[in-house]
Image: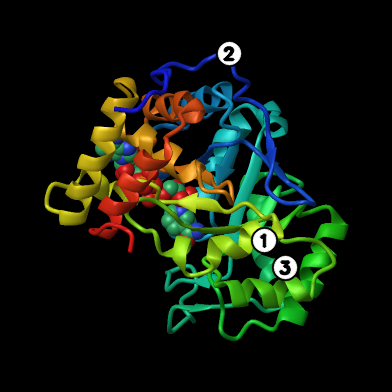
């Protein structure tokens, strides 16, 4: 048993609404980010989406994560429609979106193969389209969604500088980049990239060991963590690793005092010294509330390593 006080299950007096910087040059985001990738699956009317949006903003989850490709290029506009129901909300939000993936889609019948495009012309057009979809004059943070082997770092840097100066994009970052890919782009920029959004969770610990998080800690850039719960795999009885990790999370949850295993998973990720910003994938407000309540949760070192051991299926060497 650990000797710590039981973790609080409900939001405490701590200020969960304070924004935290992701990098030396900003931006400041909420410590938990609401992901909108699965917005379609929530099957809600615009008014119901607005209720959910207002509810998570009220809880201090004011940063929203999007991408042009979500919902096959439809989610940004759906979100913009929701925002138009209460335009004053825009000031309270930090909108993150991504660009660079070219899906096969009926909207682009001339496209013959899925690919990436990080050329200046495409980045400009994609960001203009996102601004229109969200019905906003500025995007808080735009990420290159995937590393593009044809990326010309000088060309990307030039367009990033131009779009920052225009005020259309306040900050730029990357997603799913290796340390070398991030280092290359960073070497051409006069400002620090805001983040590298990568998969981090007890079901995917690769970034803890491949240099990704070490580089971010070195540069004082905080990652954004996607699929902390393995995209729901953690709750899949058919998944052997999922079952093993779930058992370890449940044991720690019990030790910490009747908290939930998803709360432990978020705390486990937030304890990494690169200080990740977890992105919540659930569309259920009670799960968002539970994640916010877990912002004060602290695992001791042995509890943290028990989860790593379950993730890796063996003790550390
Ligand atoms: N940059 C990238 O390449 C990238 C890639 C993937 C995702 N993302 C971003 O990261 C966000 C989060 O990713 P994700 O959706 O995969 O996150 P996740 O939190 O790992 O998975 C969310 C899924 O798990 C389910 N879930 C959550 N809590 C649960 C619980 N206690 N019991 C049972 N099921 C539970 C949710 O269902 P319910 O809705 O029913 O709760 C939902 O289907 C996305 O929305 C997106 O913004 C980025």
Residue 184 at x, y percent in the picture: 69, 78
Mark 2: secondary structure? loop
- At x 24%, y 34%, the residue is 251
Q: Which residue is mark 2?
A: 13
Between marks 1 and 2, how big is the CA–CA gap?
A: 32 Å
Q: Nearer the viewer, residue 109 or 15?
A: 15
Q: Which residue is mark 3?
A: 124
**Disc number lying in front (1 or 2):** 1
- Quarter the N terminus occupies: top left
Circle 2 residues within 10 Å: few <14, some 14–19, many ≥20: few
Q: Nearer the viewer, residue 143 or 45?
A: 143
- At x 67%, y 61%, the residue is 218
Q: Which mark is residue 249?
A: none
Q: Note whether 197 is above or below 93 in the view shown.
A: below
Residue 81 found in image quarter:
top right
Q: Which mark is residue 218?
A: 1
Q: Note whether 173 is above or below 158 in the view shown.
A: above
Q: How is the image coloured?
A: rainbow
- At x 34%, y 28%, the residue is 2
């Amino acid at each position: 048993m650990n000797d710590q006080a039981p973790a609080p299950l409900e939001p405490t007096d701590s200020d969960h609404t304070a924004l935290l910087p992701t990098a030396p040059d900003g931006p400041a985001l909420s410590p938990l980010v609401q992901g909108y990738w699965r917005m379609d699956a929530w099957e809600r009317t615009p008014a119901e989406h607005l209720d959910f949006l207002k509810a998570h903003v009220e809880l201090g989850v004011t940063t929203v994560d999007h991408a042009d490709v979500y919902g096959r290029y439809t989610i940004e506009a759906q979100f913009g429609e929701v925002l138009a129901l209460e335009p004053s909300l825009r000031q309270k939000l930090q909108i993150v979106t991504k660009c660079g993936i070219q899906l096969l889609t009926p909207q682009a019948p001339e496209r013959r193969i899925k690919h990436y495009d990080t050329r200046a012309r495409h980045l400009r057009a994609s960001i203009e389209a996102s601004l229109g979809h969200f019905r906003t004059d500025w995007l808080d943070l735009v990420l290159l969604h995937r590393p593009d082997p044809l990326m010309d770092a000088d060309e990307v840097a030039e367009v990033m500088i131009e779009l920052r100066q225009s005020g259309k994009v306040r900050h730029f970052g990357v997603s799913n980049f290796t340390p070398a890919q991030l280092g290359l782009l960073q070497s051409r920029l006069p400002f620090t990239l805001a983040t590298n959004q990568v998969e981090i969770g007890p079901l995917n610990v690769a970034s803890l060991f491949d240099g990704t998080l070490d580089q971010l800690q070195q540069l004082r850039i905080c990652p954004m963590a996607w699929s902390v719960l393995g995209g729901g795999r953690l709750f899949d009885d058919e998944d052997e690793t999922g079952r093993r990790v779930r058992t370890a999370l449940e044991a720690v949850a019990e030790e910490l005092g009747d908290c939930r295993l998803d709360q432990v998973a978020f705390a486990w990720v937030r304890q990494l010294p690169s200080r990740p910003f977890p992105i919540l994938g659930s569309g259920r407000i009670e799960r968002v509330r539970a994640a916010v309540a877990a912002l004060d949760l602290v695992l001791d070192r042995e509890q943290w390593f028990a989860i790593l051991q379950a993730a890796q299926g063996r003790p550390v060497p």
